[in-house]
Image (cartoon, grey):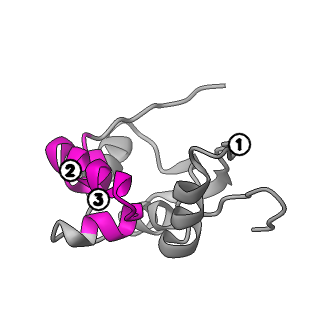
Amino acid sequence: GNGVLLYMRQEGRGIGLLNKLKAYQLQQNGKDTVEANIELGFQPDLRDYGIGAQILRDIGLKKIKLLTNNPKKIIGLKGYGLEIVERVPIETPSNPLNEKYLLTKKKKLGHLILLKGNKK
């Protein structure tokens, strides 16, 4: 099949690379990813999907399958006139190094993530 990979430079959920590094430092000191963004003075997720949606529409796409665990991406792209015909989950096995991060994304950001022994 055909596909498009669109990379938007919105590091750290829109806070930028330097602030993402500052957030990592806060996370090493016990904050979760959402708490770190808030402590730095940002919303948990500042990304805007408008430019990405415009690019996809400009290349002729109106209906897409979207690889994501983030329901806000679906809402954001639909808001700009794209039809999401299917959400394809991104399977990421949890391990001791990423389990807290994935759980935070699931609980605080609403991501559709399956964790060990958990159901969506």
Q: Amino acid at mark 2?
A: Lys
Identity of the residue drawn at 29% across and 59% down: 47
Taking 39 as reference, is 59 left or right? right
Q: Secondary structure at mark 1?
A: loop
> Which of the image's four quarters has the N terminus?
top right
Q: Which residues are magenta?
A: 9-37
Quarter of the image holding residue 97? top right
Q: Are marks 3 and 1 in contact (CB under 8 Å)?
A: no
Q: Earlier in the sequence, mark 3 or mark 1?
A: 3
Residue 118 appears anywhere in the view: yes
Q: Position of residue 105 (x, y in %)?
A: 52, 63
Alpha carbon distance from label 3 to label 1? 25 Å
97 or 110, which lies in front? 97
Instruction: Answer whether residue 40 is magenta in the image.
Output: no
- In the rendered image, residue 32 lying in the magenta stretch gets the answer yes
Q: Which residue is mark 3?
A: 47
Q: Amino acid at mark 1?
A: Pro
Q: Which residue is mark 2?
A: 22
Q: How crowded is the residue under tag 2: few (<14 C-alpha within 10 Å), some, or many (20+)?
A: some
Tell me which residue sits at (41%, 39%) in the image: 60
Question: Residue at coordinates 37% horizontally, 65% vertically from top-left?
Answer: 31
| Residue matched to label 1 | 93
